[in-house]
Each structure stands twice: as C-alpha cells, then as structure tokens.
C-alpha cells in the first residue's frame, strides 16, 4: 500500500518546468529523506504528493488509486512556516481540532500545554505553533506524513522531541514519512534512505 | 446637540498635541454618533407645525429664534434642514447597505466561481469605475422613474465596485493561504470554509466599506436631488432645499443655502473621517502610526 508518484512534471502558469519526470515512492513504516538545493521544487513536490497541486504530467497514487478530492486526506502535509498555516483569527483549540480531536497522550508527548488552548496564534512561538500543526496533521486516518522542513526553525531539544513523536508513530501505526530537509546529519539519523532532487541542467 | 458645538470640537482636534489613531477614531466615532443621534432624535421630535409656512416670518435672517433663518414662505430653515438630513440619512443608509450586499455577493462570486465569472465581474467593476458617476446615477434614477425608490436603487447600483474589488482581492488571497488549503485536506467542506475561515476575515472590511459608502451615498443623493432627478420637490431633502435656495441667492438670502449645505458637509465629513480612521486602524500596516 505505497504512496507513489510517477513521472511528475509541474510548472506554474506557463513558466519554466519546476519538476520534470520525478519518481518517488513511499512504503508504510518507511522514513524517506528528500534533500536538494534551494529552489528546485522540493516544496512543490511535497504539495503535489499531499494533493495541494495537481501535477501537469504524471500522477500520484495511493494504493493504486488517485488521492481523494474531498474528505480527510490520508496524506497530510506539515508546512515549513507554522505561522502561515494557522488562521490568525482562530484560537489554538479551534485550530487543533479542525480535523480531529487529538488525545491527551499525543498532546503530552508533544508537550502541548492545555493553557495554550485559549490563546491566539500570535501569542505562541514558532516552535509551539509547529507542535500544534503536527498534532493537527496526525489524525487516525493519516497514513503518510510529508514533513516540509518542519523543524528548521526549532532548537535542538524541541527538534529531538518532535522527531521522537514521529518515530514512535511510525512504529505504532506504520506511518510513512517523507522528510524534506537541508540538514544532512538529521536525515542520516532519521531516514531509511535519502533521495536527492537534482537539477535537470546539472 | 447643535452643529456649532461639533465644529468647535473638530477644530479642537487639530489643536491637541498628537492623539494616536485609536484615540482619534474614538473621538470621530463619538462625533459621528452624536450627529447621527442628534439628527435622528431631532427629526423625530420635530413637529410638523415647525415645517408649516408662516407668512408673518418670511425671509428672516438667522436669529436665536430661527438659528438657520426662514425662507420666502416663512418656514424655519433649521427644522427643514433637520428633516432634510433625516431623509438623507435614511436614503443613505438603505442605499449603502444594499450596496455592501452587492459588493459582497459579486466580490465573493468573482473570487470563487472561476475565471469567466471573475472576468465578468472585473469588467463590470471597471465599467462602473470608468464611467462618470453622476451621469450613471442620473440615468438610472431617471429610468427608475425618480423619487425615493429611484434614488436608492441608483445609489446602490453605482457604489459597490470599489468595495467589491477589495473583497475579491481579499478572498483571492485567503483562498491561496496555507490554512484554507489545509482545511480542505482536513476534510472540511467549501461551505464550512467559507463561513468559518473566509467570512470572519471579511467582516471588518464590510463594516469599513459600509461606513465609507454611507457619506458617499448621502452626497450623491443630495447631488441628484439638487439636479432635479432625485427625491420629489415636496420632500424637505437637503438637495431640494439647496436647489430651491439657488433662486433666492441673488436677493441676498445667503442663509438659505449656507446652513443646510454646511450641515450636510459636516455630516459627510464626520462619517468619511470615521471610515478612513477605521480602515487605517484595521490595516496592521497603519494601525500603529
């Protein structure tokens, strides 16, 4: 039951091709790293894999079927900038429960404090917000997690905490994870294998 | 509350050393609210007797008894101005509310219903913004057969484009924001997203739009009434008063036009200032100035 992208080609409007002929495959319980220079389309690929963009060429399949257009998407994307991924006019409890009701275990393991629930997003730090975003994406129907530089802005301790939670879920729920990062050592520690996105020209 | 009081208040603002935006807004809001209340309550308490002709008091210049003077039929101009303003307020409020409704509907449609609808709405906006306002107003009011209904429809139809553009832009930006796109992936329906994510962002814009459209609506109502295409002459609207008094200006009866015109000006300025300050306060870029 893999998440598989075959021959992905994508460009914005009629500009240059951002991605061309990209293949990537994720098995359940597998942690795959994706790295590569800035501006080569790692985030675009993440958006395509999670169903945010439709590729112009190729297709994304989950268990051999296209991604569902409506309803809870089993492929969840966590963004690089958590402050942009939350509605600034919502309180944290509404943001957290938009897709499902996270249980106390998950909240404790992510060190999310109940006292934060009544706050507004601008009253929390980036790291605190990112933990909310991760909890929001880890609903019971989530089978693949696309993590687009989700710990780039965090200190080492919080990074370690977040990845421990993710690794734990990989073992418990057979979650498949795509880790997008520039952090080589991090990828080496976390991933079963690392794929590098290379420029067509080079 | 009389108008002289508020003019003193307003000149007071410029003398005071630098109030911040919030304080200015509260002050302007108080002035606008006082004016509004004064006109509404004053117009309500006004007996019809005051509006009657009294040939013993024809063409009197302003005095304590008649602060705005009397006209050639001996009617008290203060009472007429007040009545005229209540009519203007009613028409303005109705027209601007309908206008905001148009703007919301068309702005939302343009931003969410695809390229063809967007193109059509943008084209309409450009046309309405490109044509001279007053000509369109007169044509529509005329086609509607004039009168209060014609004026309201004309003003409502011509005042939505600028707000519709703002709403369209706002929704387009919201739709591409990560949290709205994510909401879809969390299984939320379009309707749920529209009411929970989009609408709360639009409410402040709509409020400001309403407050800013209101003085415009009043001014344009007065303008087409002045030109004779608006409210019927037996209604004591400000536009009617002004156009009637034109004939008597050469005889030296300056008070006939000056005071009703001034009161209209003060009213329009107060709400314009209120809307502008609200807009600046809501925009995070200018709120801290």
Image (cartoon, rainbow, N blue to C red):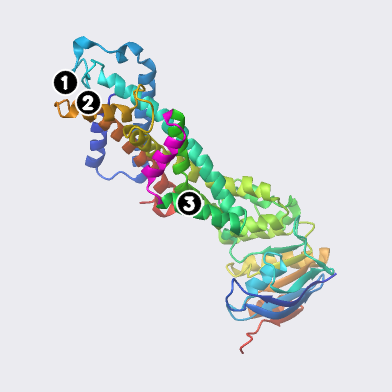
Q: Nearer the viewer, residue A202 or A171?
A: A202
**Label 2 SS:** helix
Q: Which of A85 and B154 is in front in this view?
A: B154
Q: Mark 3 lies on which chain?
A: B
Is residue B194 in view from this perspective?
Answer: yes
Looking at the image, which residue sits at the far bottom?
A202
Q: Are marks 2 and 1 in contact (CB under 8 Å)?
A: no
User: Start and end of the magenta stretch?
Assistant: B131-147
Give the crowd class for mark 3: few <14, some 14-19, many >=20 residues within 10 Å. Answer: many
**Label 3 SS:** helix
Badge 2 is on which residue? B256
Q: Which mark is on residue B173?
A: none
Badge 3 is on which residue? B125
Rendered residue at 35%/15% (across/down): B46
Answer with left or right where residue A158 lies relative to residue A102.
left
Answer with left or right where residue A164 lies relative to residue B20.
right
Among the 4 quarters of the image, the one containing residue B53: top left
Rendered residue at 23%/32% (across/down): B8
Residue B197 x/y as whole percent = 61, 49
Residue B165 x/y as whole percent = 48, 52
First-in-chain label (1 vs 3)? 1
The overriding secondary structure of the stretch rendered in magenta is: helix
Is residue B257 in view from this perspective?
Answer: no
Q: Which chain carries label 1?
A: B
Q: Distance between the residues labelled 1 and 3?
A: 47 Å
First-in-chain label (2 vs 1)? 1
Give the crowd class for mark 2: few <14, some 14-19, many >=20 residues within 10 Å. Answer: many
Residue at mark 1 shares a chain with residue at mark 3 = yes
First-in-chain label (3 vs 2)? 3
Rendered residue at 59%/74% (across/down): A14
Badge 1 is on which residue? B61
């Amino acid at each position: 039951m893999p998440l598989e992208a075959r021959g992905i080609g994508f460009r914005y409007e009629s500009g240059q091709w951002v991605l061309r002929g990209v293949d990537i495959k994720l098995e359940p319980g597998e942690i795959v790293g994706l790295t590569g220079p800035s501006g080569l389309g790692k985030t675009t690929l993440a958006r395509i894999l999670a169903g945010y963009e439709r590729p112009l060429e190729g297709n994304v399949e989950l268990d051999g079927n296209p991604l569902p257009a409506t309803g809870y998407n089993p492929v969840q994307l966590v963004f690089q900038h958590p402050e942009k991924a939350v509605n600034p006019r919502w309180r944290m409890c509404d943001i957290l429960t938009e897709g499902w009701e996270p249980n106390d275990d998950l909240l404790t393991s992510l060190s999310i404090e109940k006292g934060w629930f009544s706050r507004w997003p601008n009253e929390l730090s980036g790291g605190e917000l990112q933990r909310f975003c991760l909890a929001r994406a880890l609903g019971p129907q989530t089978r693949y997690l696309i993590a687009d530089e989700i710990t780039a802005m965090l200190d080492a301790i919080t990074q370690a905490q977040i990845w421990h939670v993710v690794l734990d879920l990989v073992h418990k729920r057979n979650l498949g994870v795509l880790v997008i990062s520039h952090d080589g050592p991090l990828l080496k520690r976390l991933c079963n294998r690392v794929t590098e996105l290379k420029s067509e020209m080079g | 509350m009389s108008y002289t009081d508020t003019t003193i208040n307003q000149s007071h603002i410029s003398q005071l050393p630098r109030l911040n935006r919030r304080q200015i807004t509260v002050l302007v809001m108080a002035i606008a609210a006082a004016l509004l209340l004064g006109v509404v309550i004053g117009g309500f308490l006004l007996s019809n007797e005051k509006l009657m002709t009294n040939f013993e008091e024809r063409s009197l210049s302003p005095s304590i008894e008649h602060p705005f003077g009397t006209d050639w039929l001996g009617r008290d101009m203060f009472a007429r101005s007040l009545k005229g303003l209540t009519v203007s307020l009613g028409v303005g409020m109705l027209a601007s509310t309908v206008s905001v409704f148009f703007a919301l509907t068309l702005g939302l449609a343009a931003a969410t219903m695809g390229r063809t609808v967007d193109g059509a709405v943008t084209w309409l906006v450009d046309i309405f913004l490109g044509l001279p306002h007053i000509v369109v107003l007169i044509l529509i009011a005329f086609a509607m057969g004039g009168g209060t209904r014609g004026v309201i429809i004309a003003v409502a139809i011509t005042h939505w484009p600028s707000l519709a553009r703002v709403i369209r832009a706002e929704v387009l930006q919201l739709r591409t924001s990560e949290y709205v796109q994510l909401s879809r992936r969390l299984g939320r329906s379009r309707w749920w997203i529209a009411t929970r994510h989009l609408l709360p962002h639009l409410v402040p814009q709509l409020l400001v739009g309403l407050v800013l459209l209101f003085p415009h609506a009043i001014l344009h109502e007065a303008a087409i009434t002045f030109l004779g295409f608006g409210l019927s002459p037996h209604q004591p609207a400000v536009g009617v008063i002004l156009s009637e008094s034109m004939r008597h200006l050469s005889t030296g009866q300056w008070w006939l036009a000056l005071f009703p015109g001034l009161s209209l000006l003060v009213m329009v300025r107060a709400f314009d200032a209120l809307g502008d300050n609200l807009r600046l306060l809501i925009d995070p870029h200018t709120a801290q100035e």
